Amino acid sequence: MSAHSVEDIKQDSGRLRGTLLASLANPITGALAEDDQTLIKYHGSYQQDDRDIREERRQQKLEPAFSFMIRTRTPGGVVTPEQWLKLDRIATTFAERGLRITTRQAFQFHGVIKGELKPTMQAINAALIDTLAACGDVNRNVAVAANPLQSQAHAAVFAQAAALSEHLLPNTRAYYEIWLDEEKVAGSGEEVEPIYGQAYLPRKFKIGFAIPPYNDVDVYAQDLGFIAIIEDGKLVGYNVSVGGGMGASHGDPETYPRLGDVIGFVTPEQVIAVGEAVVTAQRDFGNRAVRKRARLKYTIDDRGLDWFKAEVERRAGFALDAARDFAFAHNNDRFGWVEGEDGRWHLTLRIPSGRIWDRDGLSHLTGLREIARVLVKSSHTGEFRMTPNQNLVIAGVPASERWRIDALVSSHGLGAHTTATPTRLNALACVALPTCGLAMAEAERYLPEFVGKVETLLDTHGLRDMPLNLRISGCPNGCSRPYLGEIALVGKAPGRYNLMLGADHRGQRLNTLYRENIDEAAILAALDPLLARYAGERESEEGFGDFLVRSQVVRIPKHIPVQVQA
Ligand code: SRM
Ligand code: SF4
């Protein structure tokens, strides 16, 4: 690790420039200088190494196989078919592991080597997509309910989310200088950052917009959540939730997942002001001394929700109204075709762990390329929309073109939504090994096999068609939002996980630790009798998590979002 603290690195970076240009030009190593490894995150990239071959390289006295992950900033996860074709080309030219849809509706490219970072960034920008602030202590990609084309109100929510994303972008030109060869502005490094200031935020910051009855963005897991209130088909405003976050460290009670609290209601016109007020309050009061306690959730717990709400209202210049009523049905995606208000159609496809590539007998990358070509030809009506559950919507398709899409879906094995169990369709796993430097256990690579074993148990108990919300994370940071899974595995060590149970399926209740540090056989042995009881004792429509809580197999954790406590 760098000898400098992250706070020092940010302060001294000359508005995110650091020595990145020199690091990129250094031919001796595939890595960046240490401080630049922190700074490049703000430009949307992480230095990584291939952990599958780390030991082998160490024995050969070679430096680790360094490469870079690049993450896009795509608010609400929208790309045109033309952009899709360019992203596909970038993935096949510069990256190693296809296109990866993330749990925040971005794309990740893995395995880009240092010498190709700049051309890759340039190609992404040539597709009119950027990566600025996709990582780092800033506002990240803004997540939005997945299908904003379904109605005019959905479209209005998306437009608002995109505007807030723009508003909260860092002001620095460093990104354009370093990656796009923009001329250095006079006195650069002195630019004003009206929202972030010199030291940016104490920690990452995340915003999500949900549109009830769907909570696909897991709005209570966001630092700042907007829950759209739609009356008579019209967007009237949003309930505002603050203080959500999933990350924790094993064995450290000072860190914990927390769900956001609803503090009131704002009109659409007030969104930017309240967003900026929450962000700047966290900028000024977040804990910069202890990084693991620097997220907004801890600022709120340390100072109190009432204090925080008053601070936000003071900064915004208005009081929040009382929160309005709404209800969430579930936090999954809706698979298959749905018709929008304007008669166009939207098809949600299952993409296992968001990984799109042509490998292991799959041709998903090719299939989606061909679908993109159909959309380009059919007078540019359709779009691709990533979901916060790592899946993909082919959106805005005229009824007359549906058959063409269906044919490609079927011939390229993209039709899991017509055959797979609800458990498989909804399961989430984070990236984990081999690219994630923090992974303690497998997640993405283990998910298909583990789901298969759970399906066998479900079959035994006649539960195959029950929707079950299953999530795996390779470590407790919680990138697949595992603490909102009815069943979740949180990586502890290779092949060993904490088994977490008892979240609901609406994203409104966290799960709790049921068994610690156990292997697959023990996990399945623990689940078997619980599923048997669920099969025999559940009430109609009762989810597995709700059943476990009602039957007191697990206890409800202390923190439930303010608005859903009743
Ligand atoms: Fe994450 C760190 C991948 C969503 C909480 N996350 C990482 C890193 C960058 C590892 C690292 O720091 O070296 C992972 C890169 C793995 C790789 O090889 O690609 C990583 N996170 C991901 C993605 C790709 C998971 C996925 O499978 O889709 C998601 C990218 C989202 C995006 O497009 O911006 C991703 N990460 C999340 C989420 C879910 C969400 O935002 O809805 C969370 C939980 C919510 C939250 O932030 O509390 C999450 N990631 C973390 C944390 C813990 C933060 C904390 O407060 O403690 C870390 C570690 C850290 O920040 O120190 C982390
Ligand atoms: Fe990596 Fe942990 Fe996030 Fe999984 S949860 S991607 S293992 S940081």
Image: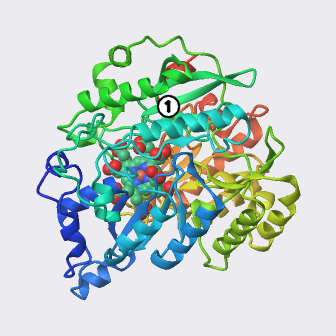
Residue that lies at the very extreme toward the bottom in this rendered image: 60
- Mark 1, ligand 1, within 8 Å: the answer is no
Left or right, residue 106 beside residue 328: left
The quadrant in which residue 369 appears is bottom right
Residue 199 can be seen in this image: yes
In the rendered image of this protein, does residue 442 appear above or below residue 563? below
What amino acid does circle 1 point to? Gly
Q: Residue 402, position in %: x, y?
A: 84, 59
Which sits in the foreground, 537 or 170? 170
Report which residue position mark 1 lands on.
Answer: 225
Name, please, the residue furthest toward the left: 3
On screen, residue 107 versus residue 67, left or right, reads: right
* Residue 511 shows in the view: no
Q: Residues within 10 Å of mark 1 (few under 14, many from 20)?
A: many
The x and y percentages for residue 261 are 47, 24
Place of residue 319 in the rendered image (x, y in percent of width and height, measured from the top left): 43, 11
Quadrant where the image shows the N terminus: bottom left
Instruction: Tell me what residue is drawn at x 51 percent, y 33 percent.
Output: 220
